[in-house]
Image: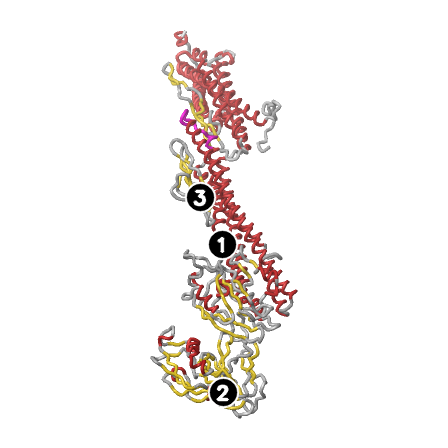
Amino acid sequence: MSATSATNPVSAESRKLSNRLLVAVREDVAAHGRVLRLLQQQEQAVTRPSDPAFLEATEALELELERLPFRKGQRDRTLKELGRVFGVEPSALTLGSVAERLGDAGAPLAVERDRLRDAILEVQKVNRRVAALIRMHRDVTRDILNSVLGDGTGSAPLDGGTLIDAEV
Amino acid sequence: MGLSTNIGLRALLTAQSAMDTIGHNVANANTEGYSRQRTLISNSRPLNLRGLQLGHGVQADRVVRSVDELLNSRITSQASALGKIDAELNEMISVEALLNEPGGDGFGSLLDGLFNSLSALSASPDDVVNRTGAVQSTDNLINRFRQVSGELAQLQSDAQTKASAIASSVNVLAERIVQLNLEITQVEAADGTIANDLRDRRDLALRELGQRVDVQVRENTEGAVQVQVGGQLLIGSRSVHEMRVETTSDGSVVVTLEGGVRPVEPKGGELAGLIAFADSFSNGIGEDLDTYAASIVRELNRAHSTGVPLEGGFTQLSGASTVPDLDGDGELGDGLLRDAGLPFDITEGELYLHVVNEITGTLSTSKIEIDPSRMTVNDFVDALSAERGVTARLDTFGRVIINSTSGTRFHFGRPVNSDPDTEGTFGGGRATTVGSFAGPFSIPTSSSLQITGSSGPFTITLEPTDFESVGEAQPDELADLLNTHPGMALNNLQASVVGGRIAIQTLGEGSAESFQITGGTGLVSLGLLPGTFTGRDLAVDVNLNGQYTGAANNQWTFEPIGDGIIGTTPGLEVAVRDAAGSIVARLDVGAGYAPGNDLVIGEGVSVSFSVGELRQSDGDAFSSDMIADSDTSDILVAFGLNAYLVGDDASTIDLRGDIREDPRLLAASATGAVGDGGALLDMIGVQTSDVAELEGTLGEFYGTMVGSIGFDISSASSAQEIESFLLTSLETQREEVSGVNVDEELVKMIQYEQAYSAAAQFLQVVRQMSDEVLALV
């Protein structure tokens, strides 16, 4: 398959679009790397919610997530044009199929695709762990508040969505 | 899967610990002495599994107190300072309330009442109703002294009892601290945790201990504290050295610790405050009150003891003070007056004793020189007995008892003798010669005096050794010696003393009486002149009137200037000289004088003479004592003779019992004359006179005393305010460090919950993002 691909002619336009896709993938790899570091920071600080590091990591993560729509838009436009060039429904394209269609010219994209997959898997692994930890801490904190703020009837003010006034 | 479960479980347990700590904090938010606790959390050590460092979640290391040991130490110290002032101030306020000044039943008002009643009495000194009023006013003052003295003693005793109670509570706290020491060291040694709650309880106990007594606290490496009081060990690591409080015989409070080599002197805490009150403040007030009472006794008695009661004198007088047998030899009265153990001091001075013949009214005055550093009590008693008309003795209790002889009364007043020339040495009917100067007389060896009387001549020979002071004859001593010579009695002659001069007279009166002094080697030394002395058919009668107002005691001697007949001889004068020989007055009794008329001498005294012949050539003279203070030595006050008040401090002050029973015994008169209130005026004068021992008047001393109490209380109140403020500030600081703020704890928890929720939402987005991108891969 790769031999066949290597013989396929690559148009100038498809080369141009594939380069654009390669840049987008590299940006995603870098973004996942940053997200991974932020998750690790949160994991370190999760037991110390008053520690500024926890809040800073959360805020940095929020900033990182704000860039998602822009990258997704860029990626979607490139895949749409590639779909047109390849004569394929854009939603059916993957990085792997694009790299294969490009033949030898798609080798850099294939490498970046592997790096991206590894980065995503690592982010997902850490994300699951940190999410579990945070949920547990949030639940425990809620239990404490419910027990302290409860009126003794077993009601849980926080679970019921009660607005907490700390001065009450 | 197993690892994840462990991590989750550990996180939950950690969070549970944190929740327990927060719950503990909230539950003890109002517990006195509780210190906020917090759970220290850290990452668990990672596991090395399959070559990978795997995170192992979170763990709770330990729960620690939020505490500032230095601050706690300062609070304990401050509690001591405040405890001392609180305790002392409470007692001081009780004393102020006790004195109730200014108030109707305060000393100031009652003393005014006494002087007012004496003043009312002075208007009519013989009025028995007014005398009863004076007695009642005196009783009111005395009762107040006794009440305040008793209650002050009770306050002092109560403070001592409270001090004992505090020592007991100190011991209880010490036992509790030792028990906590044991528990803390056991807990902390067993698993290395910090016994937070036990330490809080021990800190609280230490603070309560500090409130009672100032302590120095040191913690050893095992976590036990050792506590010292005044440098001595009260609490060891495992033992208590029991505190004891005892009151010594002199009323001071002594604090000791079991096994201690010396008493402890607390400087702070309630114990120190009570001791300061009992030993210093109340003692000081008590001493001031005693000084005040003693001064009233002394000053009123000074005036009253020389006064004369309504009857005009005493037939018997008993001293209120007793002479103790200080040397323990079984004999009372052998000690010197200055060391006799009497309640008031005796100074060098003189005491005038007057004996009144109840039938003739004749007044006989004698003066006893008092030298407390030479005279014993017995000497004084003997000196009284030596005077004609009285006998004196010490009874078995050591009181001086003076009795008059039959038909006489005696007193210690200051009358002007209306009949000063009872011996007739001033123009009297008896043949008389008076020496030209006063003794003592220097007596050379074998001094002779040659006299010829009605029975013939005789010679008296004097030797220097005849006299107590060899070679120096006192006038009375010389007169007595002359009178013992047989020639004197055989010739109806008598020697006497006139103003310190020696006088020789016949016993009979009239122009038929005479004697001669013919010579002798002793004439010059006695101031006598040779000559023939003849009696007179018309004797001069002298009468002194008035009340001597001079500032000091004196003796006036009257002698004619020239020879002549009173009211007839032109230029005939009588000179009045004081004891120093200075002229006090020259009185014209010559041709222009109407015999019997008063001639003013001065100092409140006047004199009148009847018709008669005066002879300067015969040495005519008489003398009379002018008494401003008949007891300048205070010996009557010291022995309590004719006292108005008895006792010598606030607890023993009392009115003389027989005066209370019979107010006529109040010695209102200074002279014994009817209607005279001279002694009363002296007593009233006490109110405004400076008292040397008080460095001011009675009122000023009492005012200073009351003002001083007020000042002390005011100062202590200010100090209490400051110390209280400091303690409150320190407690506020402690609250900031160690206190539980429920709101703050909850706010923190809500913030945590919100942070976790936000993070969880973002992680959800991350998951969606990664899923979406992974779909492209």
Horizontal relation, residue B469 to residue B557: left or right: left
Q: Between residues B112 and B459, which one lies in front from this camera angle?
A: B459
Among the two numbered marks 1 and 3 on one chain, the one whose residue lies closer to the N terminus: 3
Q: Between residues B733 and A82, which one lies in front from this camera angle?
A: B733
> What residue would you read off at disc 2?
B513
The reply to whether residue B66 is visible in this rendering is no
Q: In which quarter of the image is residue A96?
A: top left
Between disc 1 and disc 2, the foreground one is 2
What secondary structure predominates along the stretch shown in magenta? helix
Q: Is residue B356 magenta?
A: no
Query: What number is the disc on residue B255?
Result: 3
The secondary structure type at the circle numbered 3 is: strand
Q: Between residues B657 and B644, which one lies in front from this camera angle?
A: B657
Q: Does the magenta stretch include residue B189?
A: yes
Which residue is located at x 57 percent, y 77 percent?
Answer: B546
Count of marks overlaid on the render? 3
Real-space CA distance between mark 1 and mark 3, rounded to the nearest whole angstrom: 21 Å
Which residue is located at x 59 percent, y 29 percent?
Answer: A164
- Which portion, as a residue range, is magenta? B188-199
Tell me the chain of label 2: B
Real-space CA distance between mark 2 and mark 3, rounded to the nearest whole angstrom: 88 Å
Tell me the chain of label 1: B
The reply to whether residue B190 is visible in this rendering is yes
Query: What number is the disc on residue B284?
Result: 1
